[in-house]
Image: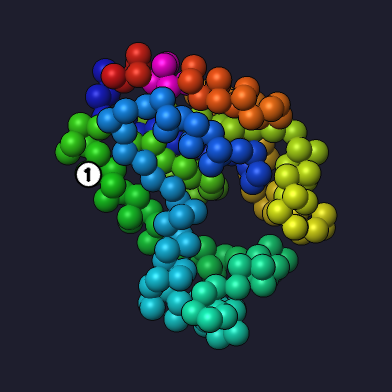
Amino acid sequence: MCTAPIVAITGGIASGKTSFRRHLSIFLEDTEWFDADACASRLLNGSREVRAEVEKVLGREIYVGGKLDRAQARLRIFFDPCCRAQLERVLHPRVRGIWMAQVVRSKVLGRKLLAELPLLYETGWETSCDFIMVIACSFATQLRRLASRGICDSLARKMIAVQLPAEEKVRRAHEVVWNDGPPRLLTEQARVTAGYLTKRYG
């Protein structure tokens, strides 16, 4: 039995990955946590080297008051495939390096690591994981949730389209959590999942 497993949480945008991870953290002890989006955000706003690289791609005006203008960056990234590819080359190797350092740390400590990795399959990082959970919901639910965040329909559809189809993620997962229901159902699914992970890995 793997006593320090690497467990990934992934899924499409607005599927509820972060909500599920937060629920899961209530029920799991002796666990290390990693959030790829939060890691990328820290790099974008806290690394001078990354900022310089981003400004080369998006222009200096993409930073306002020292912070990345996420709304403008989102428009550029999702409507310009070349721009998106350039930014991925800046961020993905750095995020992976930080994640793998935490993987090593977790192995040394003998603790399981749960990582929220939205682009797990798109980046090919699944080979580093022992167990993969996909959080999924309907296309209509994704659109509704993105609209509630102030994202227009055309951009929302673009954001969903650039990712691997949900059906393919579901097919490749070890466990699927369907998140079209009320929050209390997601909490219960997190409780059940935590019990399973504890039983399987300790």
The image position of residue 45, as x and y in percent, is 45, 70
State whether residue 39 is above or below residue 200. below
Viewer-proximal residue, 34 or 174? Answer: 34
Q: Residue at x 27, y 50 (%)?
A: 101
Q: Is residue 54 found left or right of 150 in the rendered image?
A: left
Q: Position of residue 129 (x, y in %)?
A: 38, 35
User: What residue is shown at x 49% (from left), y 54% (from top)?
Assistant: 37
- Residue at disc 1, secondary structure: helix
The image shows residue 28 at horizontal and vertical percentages of 37, 27
Magenta highlight on residue 195: yes
Residue bounds of the magenta highlight: 193-197
Callout 1, which amino acid? Arg
Q: Return the x and y of residue 183 as percentages of the image width and height.
A: 64, 29
Residue under numbered circle 1: 105
Residue 118: within the magenta?
no
Number of callouts: 1
Q: Answer left or right for 73 relative to 40.
A: right
Q: Nearer the viewer, residue 82 or 183?
A: 183
Name the residue at 62% across, 24% down. 184
For residue 173, side relative to residue 154 (left or right): left
For residue 27, say whether it is visible: yes
In the image, residue 167 above or below residue 50: above
